[in-house]
């Protein structure tokens, strides 16, 4: 018997297996790709707006995001200083993005859209072109322009989000994911790739850091129990399916929420009107983590599970971008944890001790009377489960903490955190570099089809 036919059959089978493997891996490559040593500006989509030319040496720690479209919110006072830091770190991994600001400009080859000055007259013109004015519920107030003339730069931000999403969708109509961030935000692209990798962008999915439910503006008619919003600086992410639902409501939402003081709150109100409301943190399978780089902030701190992986860093200044960039370069495949960020910010896993700092009481392990912060530090180091401590000068008391979340400024107190105890693996398990924690069960159930997605989205 000749071996030639058998050899040809085996060779043909081998070729078929290779082609099958390449085909099967295409979706993963298309979703997020590992950057090459050298590349030019390119896109897998045919966009109507031009793409920025990126440096020849992209970051090596993150992942390319060819199916994402980004809107970067900035202002004429900050655009040159802050965007240069983004462009020097993670932004070369983003193929498709626009800037939204309070002025028109072109930054390189990328348009800067004025999302402040013309937005209400433009939205009203679009609405009245399709509907009789008397049928519209939210005409512009007569004193709107006078009110807006008095607004400082930071207050102008509130007007940009909704029209920014409109520009983003119209610029990149074929993207899978739409992400709005601030100009002082860092994106950990590998973590963002991973948290979306197993999700259908055609589904009604939106993500962010969930915040409160306060009333906002004169036209806020959200009933009780109220829904929240995604904190804007940490990033607001919509799937293609969610954006298609939100987009037809944007012009009316622009008019309706004209006096709501936060742009992220306006997006949350619009999501409710569009039927895709933001659920509470513990109900939301897609709530993600972010790290606030400003120290002594009452809302933020270091979570107890150091293996958790943030999607973004926010409120970053000066060397913060470099710290985040360095952490991403050194983390396995760019999968940055809070432990990695701690080490990058502190020059290693060293103890962090500072005066006039307090860690809130809900993290207490217990405590005892002590006469000095040094003694408090020492007893924390010898107590199992202790991550941080606070010593009060007036009380001469030492409170031991299992968590360092929610730092706040408070005179007469000294607080510290144990760096070595914050390594990933000591507290959270070395193999568990997790993206989300509180709603993991709900997310699993949603992905398996066991629950109605609208319960949790």
Image: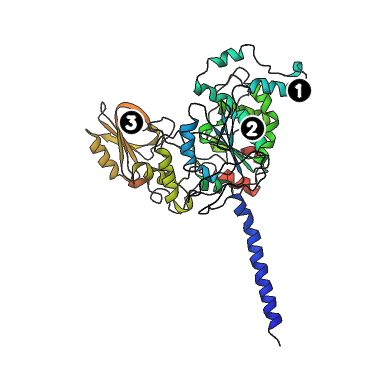
Q: Secondary structure at mark 1?
A: helix
Q: Secondary structure at mark 3?
A: strand
In-image side of 271 versus 35 (left or right): right
Q: Secondary structure at mark 2?
A: helix
Q: Quadrant of residue 238?
A: top right
Q: Quadrant of residue 278?
A: top right
Per the image, the residue denoted by label 1 is 129
The location of residue 64, given as percent across then percent down, is: 55, 48
Q: Residue at x 69, y 28 (%)?
A: 249
Is residue 409 in sight in this rendering? yes
Q: Are marks 1 and 2 in contact (CB under 8 Å)?
A: no
Per the image, the residue denoted by label 2 is 167
In-image side of 54 versus 18 (left or right): left
Q: Residues within 10 Å of mark 1 (few under 14, many from 20)?
A: few
Compare residues 260 and 430 and report the one nearer the observer: 260
Residue 135 in the image: above or below residue 12:
above
Residue 337 in the image: above or below residue 275:
below
* Sequence-wise first label, 1 or 2: 1
Mark 3 to mark 2: distance in Å?
43 Å
Compare residues 376 and 338 and report the one nearer the observer: 338
Is residue 290 in sight in this rendering? no
Residue 357's tag is: 3
């Amino acid at each position: 018997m000749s071996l030639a036919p058998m050899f040809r059959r085996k060779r043909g089978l081998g070729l078929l297996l290779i082609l099958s493997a390449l085909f099967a891996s295409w979706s993963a490559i298309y979703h997020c790709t590992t950057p090459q040593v050298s590349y030019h500006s390119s896109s897998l989509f045919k966009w109507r707006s031009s793409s920025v030319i990126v440096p020849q040496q992209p970051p090596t720690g993150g992942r390319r995001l060819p199916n994402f479209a980004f809107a970067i919110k900035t202002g004429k006072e900050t655009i040159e200083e802050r965007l240069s830091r983004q462009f020097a770190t993670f932004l070369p991994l983003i193929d498709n993005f626009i800037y939204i600001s309070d002025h028109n400009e072109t930054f390189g080859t990328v348009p800067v859209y004025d999302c402040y000055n013309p937005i209400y007259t433009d939205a009203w013109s679009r609405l009245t072109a399709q509907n009789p004015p008397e049928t519209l519920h939210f005409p512009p107030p007569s004193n709107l322009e006078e009110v807006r003339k008095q607004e400082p730069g930071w207050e102008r931000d509130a007007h940009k989000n909704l029209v920014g999403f409109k520009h983003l969708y119209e610029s990149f109509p074929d993207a899978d994911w739409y992400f709005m961030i601030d100009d002082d935000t860092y994106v950990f692209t590998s973590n963002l790739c991973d948290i979306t990798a197993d999700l259908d962008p055609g589904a009604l999915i939106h993500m962010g850091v969930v915040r409160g439910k306060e009333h906002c503006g004169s036209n806020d008619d959200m009933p009780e129990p109220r829904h929240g919003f995604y904190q804007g600086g940490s990033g607001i992410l919509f799937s293609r399916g969610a954006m298609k639902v939100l987009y037809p409501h944007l012009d009316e939402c622009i008019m309706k929420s004209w006096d709501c003081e936060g742009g992220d709150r306006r997006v949350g109100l619009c999501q409710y009107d569009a039927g895709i409301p933001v659920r509470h943190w513990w109900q939301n399978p897609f709530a993600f983590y972010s790290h606030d780089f400003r120290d002594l902030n009452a809302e933020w701190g270091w979570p107890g599970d150091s293996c958790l992986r943030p999607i973004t860093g926010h409120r970053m200044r000066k060397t913060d971008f470099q710290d985040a960039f360095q952490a991403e370069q050194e983390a396995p495949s760019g999968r940055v944890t809070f432990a990695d960020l701690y080490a990058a910010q502190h020059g290693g896993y060293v103890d962090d001790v500072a005066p006039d700092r307090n860690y809130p009481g809900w993290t207490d392990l217990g405590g005892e009377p002590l006469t000095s912060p040094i003694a408090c530090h020492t007893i924390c180091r010898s107590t199992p489960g202790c991550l941080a401590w606070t010593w009060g000068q007036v009380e001469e008391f030492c409170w031991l903490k299992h968590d360092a979340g929610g730092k706040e400024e408070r005179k007469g107190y000294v607080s510290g955190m144990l760096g070595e105890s914050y390594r990933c693996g000591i507290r959270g398990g070395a193999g568990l570099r997790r993206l989300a924690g509180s709603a993991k069960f709900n997310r699993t159930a949603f992905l398996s089809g066991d629950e109605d997605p609208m319960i949790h989205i």
